[in-house]
Amino acid sequence: MNDLFGTGSDKPAPKKPAKAAQPVAPPRAATPAVPDSSDYSAKDIEVLEGLEPVRRRPGMYIGGTDENALHHLAAEILDNSMDEAVAGHASFIEVTLEPNNFLTIRDNGRGIPVDAHPKFKHLSALEVILTTLHSGGKFSGKAYETSGGLHGVGSSVVNALSETMEVEVARDRVLWKQAYALGKPLTKLVNAGPVHNRRGTTIRFKPDQSIFGPLQFSAARLYRLCRSKAYLFRGVEIRWSCDPSLIVGDTPAAAVLHFPGGLRDSLEADINGTAKVLPQIWSGEANLPGESTGRMEWAAVWLEAGDGFIHSYCNTVPTPSGGTHETGYRNALVKGLRAWGEQRGNKRAAQITADDVLEPMASKLSVFLRDPQFQGQTKEKLTSPEATRLVETALRDRFDHYLAGDPANADNLLAFVIERAEERIRRKESKDTARKSPTRRLRLPGKLTDCTRTNVAETEIFLVEGDSAGGSAKQARNRETQAVLPLRGKILNVASASADKLRQNQELKDLIEALGCGVGDRFDRAKLRYGRVIIMTDADVDGAHIASLLMTFFYRELPELVRNGHIYLAQPPLYRLTQGAKSVYAMDDADLQRKTKREFKAGSKVDVSRFKGLGEMPPAQLKETTMDPSKRTLLKVMAAPEDRAATNNLVENLMGRRPELRFAFIQEHAKSVTEVDV
């Protein structure tokens, strides 16, 4: 113990007589030294006053010191002017970007109060707001019923992180000025004299380079910010201007931003002509239930292709991470569409999920709440728990009325979403053979007779019924550009078969492998091996049935090929009319009668031969009538987006699992069938 604490003597300890060797015990852990408390005392406790915490830890207030944080300063000041506009006190806001990274934001609102603050009587309210955290006029809700600045730190944080800030306030026909640097006042509040045609607040500031380094404001980014704010509140006019030397790209040097259409105008500009499922954008406004000042605005459109998005806002503040208002929005749309499907007797609507409805939807949502709660000072996510119920309740009623007011479009939207749901289910269940990698030999079905060219735009594949027809087609084809795949009789009806049967069907596996583009989540249109897929079946009832089964397969399992115009129907003739050296082909019974009268003399003998099938047609005739691109007729298989619901219903009624629907169709159309004698 003396060795541990010190003996107090410099003399060495006396030597002891040597002893016989003893077993060595394991070393004991050293006793930790008692810490010296003298190096940590009251003098080490710092008290950061005023705005010093902001300068020491800016990330706590604006999320960092990167480009996003820099532009967050602009958003904080602009939000204060927007709050004045939303409250009805300002009609315009001016935003000016100058050289040397100076930004000026001016509004014609009421102006920040300049009278002495009752608690800090030696300071004006303006100086309190700009130098004291958690100060402002938005806590009680008396000055602003709804606002984006809720924490009372926005203006003071911008001031703290600015190399210089100049403030002008025009109130009661008097102009007041004050200058700041690094969050501290350089001058007292100065009365600059009377003004008669001016009111509101002007703030000009330059971010501190010691905080943000060489980062500069982006004219394009500030312009987009101003434009989004103008869309969010249709009652405000934002006047943007920028020094021409700072312009990059197509950002205007000056613009007046005012959008009477609000979010609808914004969404229309964003989608920029993209194909829509429904012809019009659905938009509107509504008061939130039970909220005397709460309201919402929305605009939504479903896109035929590509990914959608939801851009949401609360009190004009962007919420890129979403939040409770988006949850209520989603709930209203999904529940409303399911209910519409149930009302229309469509049992498949029950399988709809939020992803099916929302992934293809482009939408804007803006809510105004009296006392919203955000996640963090940067306000990227709304956390107010009541917002979910308020938004869902307000929107659901209007969505139900929207669907009921236009049943045709509502059915088309429902059909589109059900298509996506079924496609999602197919992707989940799909276990088809994966495409081989480019470094390995491509596996192709044995019955496929491929063409030699690889340019997709120049090639086509004929799907024919049976080996006999396949043999004729192979002899009649152009070997460079035309491939032939014989199919064994009638393929599986995918509209009534289970997923297991579909996966096990060899004919469909061969067809998928021949096309090369995969199905489900492995579908890749870029890997399609042929530009045209031509269904070539006999010109009789059985051939029409096989063609119907193939079209059903493409419509259900490979809808992208139908939408993009890759599927065709060949038009082989059913009859050959001969008189001497003259031969004419007729497509069906009606065509036979027309051509008999038109092509030959009345009363003359015409030999009529009926083709039993493509396998019975000589290759030369098959080429001449059906396969030669210069002479043949092809019908393109298309599904019009505006008739999506009708098409879905037709496929389900004629090819689905309920035979009574087919029987009803036959009964309804039986009178339109006529018998033709030859």
Image (cartoon, helix red, strand yellow):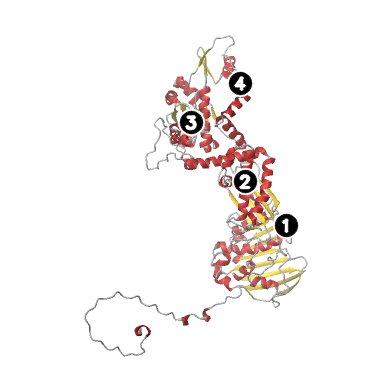
The amino acid type, in three-letter code, at marker 1 is Ser
**Mark positioned earlier in the residue sequence (1 or 2):** 1
Labelled pair 3, 2 in contact (Cβ < 8 Å): no
Residue at the spot 49% in from the left edge and 43% down from the top edge: 428
The CA distance from mark 3 to mark 4 is 27 Å
Residue 239 vertical placement versus 565 (above, below)? below
Labelled pair 4, 2 in contact (Cβ < 8 Å): no
Indicate which label's residue lies in the foreground, 4 or 2: 2
Depth order, front residue of 290/510: 290
Labelled pair 1, 2 in contact (Cβ < 8 Å): no
Depth order, front residue of 52/65: 52
The amino acid type, in three-letter code, at marker 4 is Val
Q: What's the mark number on residue 292?
A: 1
Quadrant of residue 454 within the rendered picture: top left
Give the residue number, with chain letter if any, for mark 2.
335
Indicate which label's residue lies in the foreground, 3 or 4: 3
The amino acid type, in three-letter code, at marker 2 is Lys
The percent coordinates of residue 352 (x first, y second) are 57, 43
The N terminus: image quadrant: bottom left
The CA distance from mark 3 to mark 2 is 35 Å
Give the residue number, with chain letter if any, for mark 3.
492
Element marked by disc 3: loop
